Image (cartoon, rainbow, N blue to C red):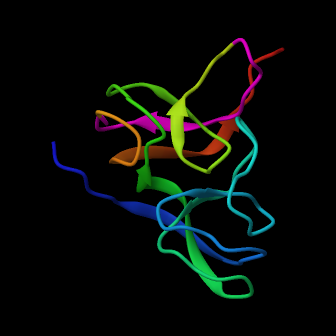
């Protein structure tokens, strides 16, 4: 399967800092900066502080991988806003599931964003 996207719900946020394309962002409009944090969705493209931008919150989206990822992997974010494999023992929010694989950091994957996030008990 190629890397594609099929968004179902997209909302606009105002960037509170610079945001890179295909990175996850918080509800405050900032690119994720804490591993495993709660996120709003994935930025469609890069923007500067103060710009409005679309965020895919439900459906599938292109997201940059922070490392090697296999199909079906539960996803959380790293401190750079990239998708990484969730560690269920760390109490991280899981924002989606990998629909395509990545061979390493910087590679695009298609992620299913389920619209709600799971945070396993710590």
Q: Residue at x 26, y 56 (%)?
A: 4
Residue 9 lies in the magenta-colored region: no
Q: Quadrant of the N terminus?
A: top left
Rendered image quadrant of residue 90:
top right
99 vs 48, left or right, is left
Residue 55 or 31: which is nearer the viewer?
Answer: 31
At 75% across and 44% down in the image, what residue appears?
Answer: 38
Q: Position of residue 42 (x, y in %)?
A: 55, 59
**117 or 53: nearer the viewer:** 53
Q: Quadrant of the C terminus?
A: top right
Residue 109 in percent (x, y) is at: 34, 46
Q: Is residue 33 above or below residue 75?
A: below
- Residue shown at 38% from the left, 29% from the top: 69
How far across and down, in percent of the image, does residue 60 sit? 41, 52
Residue 94 counted in the magenta span: yes
Q: Which region is colored magenta?
A: 89-102
Compared with 1, 57 (above or below) is below
């Amino acid at each position: 399967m190629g890397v594609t996207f099929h968004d179902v719900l997209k909302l606009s946020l105002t960037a509170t800092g610079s945001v890179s394309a295909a990175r996850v962002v918080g509800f405050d409009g900032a690119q994720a900066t804490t591993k495993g944090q709660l996120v709003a969705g994935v930025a469609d493209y890069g923007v500067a502080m103060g710009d409005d931008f679309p965020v895919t919150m439900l459906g599938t989206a292109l997201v940059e991988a922070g490392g090697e990822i296999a199909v079906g992997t539960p996803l959380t974010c790293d401190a750079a806003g990239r998708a990484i494999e969730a560690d269920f023992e760390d109490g991280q929010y899981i924002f989606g599931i990998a629909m395509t694989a990545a061979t390493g950091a910087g590679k695009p994957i298609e992620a299913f964003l389920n619209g709600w996030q799971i945070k396993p008990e710590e």
